[in-house]
């Protein structure tokens, strides 16, 4: 069994590679990653020398490179994590989001059709559904909730989802789609809320909370997401969408306060800054389909997961300190300098 994992040098993709090597040591895993600012080859160091692993630096939008790789590897399965993934960057510069997230997905699926790949799995997001009101806790996203994306990022992911389902219907490509809520855990790039707050707090830098910090996200430990994707690959029904989430809604401000408490840092570091444009109020996933069909349930609750995550960032300072340099430093100054 050969699986091509795109975007495997990023946060969730790398965790997925580690998870799959533990769960299925007999599988061959080929990682295709462009190594954008968000990709970090040092993350994959523990598997680089393994004979059942191959890393290929390449762009999912590069048709020739993708076809060459498929011809060499003849993959059974392709799991597409490769994407531009940060909402704030999509507001600054949407073009590359449309390029990678939509057209890159098309290039991969064309190769899947050409090489008769047995499963194309698209890693999507709950953000394709738009947002929910703060005062209606009874409302959750189901797989039947209409797509109603708010940001260029989520619109590009929703567009890709439509294209994936169209390739299934038109060309008979065996596809599945998962739409997961916000992930946290090891190897998350420190531009996203949780690792940004941990790294800033450790450096006694301001903790920039957008608006009043009352927006709600539904947090899932990354390994639980990886396990769900594995279950979908094994037993998911072709042509279907599966929501993934663990009923763990939290307000941003409560997460930031919790991080301060765990690190023994003063809440005086919290700085309220100008809100994100079009900021989604609340995400909340109804995971009953994946639970009923595939028996998936999250294993790490937030209390344990956030402590594990903070411990990981404390123990791997060199991993994120190396990142907080160069292009990222410029981005950070641009993003938060005048906010
Ligand atoms: P990430 O930004 O950490 O990693 C993305 C990876 O894709 C990087 O390694 C990058 O180098 C690579 N990449 C980007 N453009 C590429 C291209 N053109 N060709 C090849 N590789 C390219 O993202 P992440 O948080 O790990 O998210 C992975 C996937 O999961 C994305 O599709 C995202 O939409 C989805 N998702 C993320 C979350 C979350 O909370 N982070 C939640 C639900 C779904
Ligand atoms: P983020 O990690 O960017 O994920 P997403 O926008 O995909 O949910 O942001 C999570 C929440 O945290 C979101 O409501 C925006 C907020 N946020 C801040 O308040 N400050 C920050 O510096 C960042 C990056 C995010």
Image: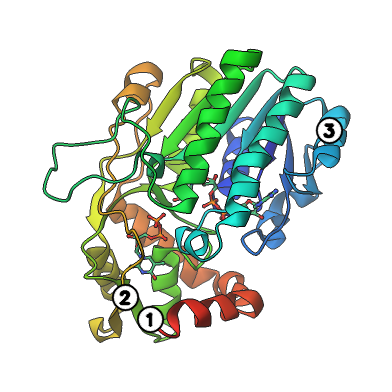
Q: Are marks 2 and 1 in contact (CB under 8 Å)?
A: yes
Decide which of tag 3 and tag 1 comes sooner along the chain: 3
Quadrant in which the C terminus appears:
bottom left
Q: Which residue is mark 3?
A: 67
Give the spatial CA distance, label 3 vs label 1: 44 Å
- Residue 256 x/y as whole percent: 29, 69
Q: Which residue is mark 2?
A: 274
Q: Residue lying at the far left in this picture: please name it.
A: 135
- Which of discs 3 and 1 lies nearer the camera? The answer is 1
The residue depicted at 36 percent of the width and 84 percent of the height is 206
Quadrant in which the N terminus appears:
top right
Q: Is residue 325 above or below residue 254?
A: below
Q: Which residue is mark 1?
A: 339
Task: Tell me if residue 233 can be seen.
Answer: no
Give the spatial CA distance, label 2 vs label 1: 6 Å
Say whether mark 2 is within 8 Å of ligand 2: no
- Residue 62 x/y as whole percent: 79, 44
Say whether mark 3 is within 8 Å of ligand 1: no
Q: Quadrant of residue 111?
A: top right
The residue depicted at 62 percent of the width and 34 percent of the height is 79
Q: Nearer the viewer, residue 339 or 243?
A: 339
In the rendered structure, the answer to whether residue 263 lies left or right of residue 63 reads left
């Amino acid at each position: 069994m050969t699986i091509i994992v795109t975007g495997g040098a990023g946060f969730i993709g790398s965790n997925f590679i580690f998870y799959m090597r533990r769960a299925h040591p007999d599988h061959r895993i080929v990682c295709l990653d462009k190594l954008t600012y968000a990709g970090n080859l040092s993350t994959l160091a523990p598997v680089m020398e393994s004979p059942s692993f191959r890393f290929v630096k390449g762009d999912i939008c590069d048709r020739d490179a993708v076809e060459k790789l498929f011809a060499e590897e003849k993959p059974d399965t392709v799991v597409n994590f490769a994407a531009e993934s940060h909402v704030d960057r999509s507001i600054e510069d949407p073009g590359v989001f449309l390029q990678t997230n939509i057209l890159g997905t098309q290039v991969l699926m064309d190769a899947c059709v050409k090489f008769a790949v047995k499963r194309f799995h698209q890693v999507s997001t709950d953000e394709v559904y738009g947002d929910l009101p703060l005062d209606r806790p009874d409302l959750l996203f189901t797989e039947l909730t209409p797509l109603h994306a708010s940001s260029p990022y989520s619109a590009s992911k929703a567009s890709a989802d439509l294209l994936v389902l169209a390739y299934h219907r038109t060309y008979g490509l065996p596809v599945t789609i998962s739409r997961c809520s916000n992930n946290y855990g090891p190897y998350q790039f420190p531009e996203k809320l949780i690792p940004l707050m941990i790294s800033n707090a450790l450096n006694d830098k301001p903790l920039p909370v957008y608006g009043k910090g009352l927006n709600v996200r539904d947090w899932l430990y990354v390994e639980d997401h990886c396990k769900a994707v594995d279950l979908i690959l094994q037993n998911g029904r072709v042509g279907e969408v599966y929501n993934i989430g663990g009923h763990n809604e939290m307000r941003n401000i409560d997460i930031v306060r919790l991080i301060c408490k765990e690190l023994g840092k003063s809440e005086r570091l919290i700085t309220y800054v100008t809100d994100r444009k079009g900021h989604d109020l609340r995400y909340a996933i109804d995971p009953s389909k994946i639970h009923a069909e595939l028996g998936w349930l999250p294993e790490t609750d937030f209390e344990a997961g956030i402590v594990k995550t903070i411990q990981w960032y404390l123990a791997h300072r060199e991993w994120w300190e190396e990142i907080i340099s160069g292009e990222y430093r410029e981005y950070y100054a641009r993003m938060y300098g005048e906010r």
